Image (cartoon, rainbow, N blue to C red):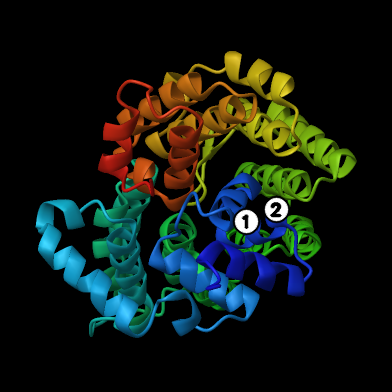
Amino acid sequence: MTETLGEMLRRARLIKRLSQAEVGERVGYSASWVSRVENGKVRPDDATLAALCDLLALSREDVGLEGDDVRRRKLLTLTLGAGAAAVLPSSAAADSKDVVERSLFRLPEARPVSRESLAAALTASRSLFHDAQYAELGRALPALISRSLASMAHDVAARSYVLLAQLAIKNYQGYSWIASDRARAQAEKAGNPVVMGEAAHAMAITMRRGGEYEAAIDHLQQAAGRLGAAPDQLAMEGTLLLTAGYSAAQAGWRSPAMDFMGEAEETASRRETTAQKLYIPGVFGLDQTRVFRVSVHQALGEADQALNYASKIDARRLPNAERRGRMCMDVARVRRDVGEPERAFYALRAMEQYAPEEASRPKVRAVTSELLTMNGEIPGLRRFAQRTGAAV
């Protein structure tokens, strides 16, 4: 009897002695999503399926990413027409991959430019990230990176690569290692501890996404140890502590997670003046720590605490669309975990209103697919899934 895709993935996972949670974390999805893939209820998009092959030591041909099956899918796409192809997850993944590849491997030629023009371009790119306009950011980054390198502006180049790493993490994380490492190299040349902290932050998130929780936390602590007492350095330290707390929570280490969160909150209370704006990841302050509390308690499976913190946050007070989108996503996960698919969908719909491009991220598509499985009759859910390219 022919082995199904789900059965093949399950067998390969067991051979590698990995749990469903470990596999999900490494490819950017939940354990329940992995379970549904293995049970044949969901088919991963091509980019995620390729990542699963790399993780589980399967060949592309084994899972239909090469050979006749690929040609058949391409023919199907052409037959369906451009309108239907626009919502296919594999199409979105390919676009995201191309956007990141241009900034890593196909930079345009550039000449040195003034620092003022570089600073203005970096500020504009940062605003695009905060406004969750990722497609526009992807178009702007190649020229910014190329000009900053030509101008030997190492701090601008580092921060530009950090933006690229964040873009890769959100949409195509296969290249986030390269972008983070280039950010690190440029930050070390700049010698600015805040810039080095931003690069370390991007690298640590990449490590965490790869399941290297302890290494990620060590990296964050080392970066925090280089920072002083200036307001921008304290803000960076607090951001690193928040990420360390979430990394510990993702690993299931509750005590360290609570310790890191407490340190971050203490740092925020000491420096809650005008919010200290960083190029990446955003604005650090007490509201930021509350958003992370939702994430941390959700990761630890503590739904009541997560919802308690969420109830205290007015999303409209959060500093930008990217942060508002993150909070809505965390609330959606909690509602999904406690068996409230309709309320989870309300959170996803709010996220789409705040940050439309956040709604088409791979993790959002995975949650949407889960909600369809839980209750496909929720009004508006199927249309949302079609708009965002969720696998059904």
C-alpha separation, residue under disc 2 versus residue under disc 1: 5 Å
> Image height check: is 161 above or below 313?
below
> Image height check: is 351 above or below 255?
above
Quick check: can you spot residue 27? yes
Residue at x 35% of width, y 76% of height:
101
Location of residue 389 in the rendering, given as x and y in whole percent from the top left corner: 31, 48
Furthest residue toward right: 255
Q: Which residue is mark 1?
A: 24
Instruction: Please name whichever residue, 169 or 31, is drawn nearer the observer in this view of the structure.
Output: 31
Location of residue 49 in the rendering, given as x and y in whole percent from the top left corner: 48, 68
Left or right: where does residue 347 sit relative to residue 266?
A: left
Location of residue 371 in the rendering, given as x and y in whole percent from the top left corner: 47, 33
Q: Residues within 10 Å of mark 1 (few under 14, many from 20)?
A: many
Q: Secondary structure at mark 1?
A: helix
Residues tagged 2 and 1 counted as in contact (Cβ below 8 A) = yes
Instruction: Please name whichever residue, 191 or 198, is drawn nearer the observer in this view of the structure.
Output: 198
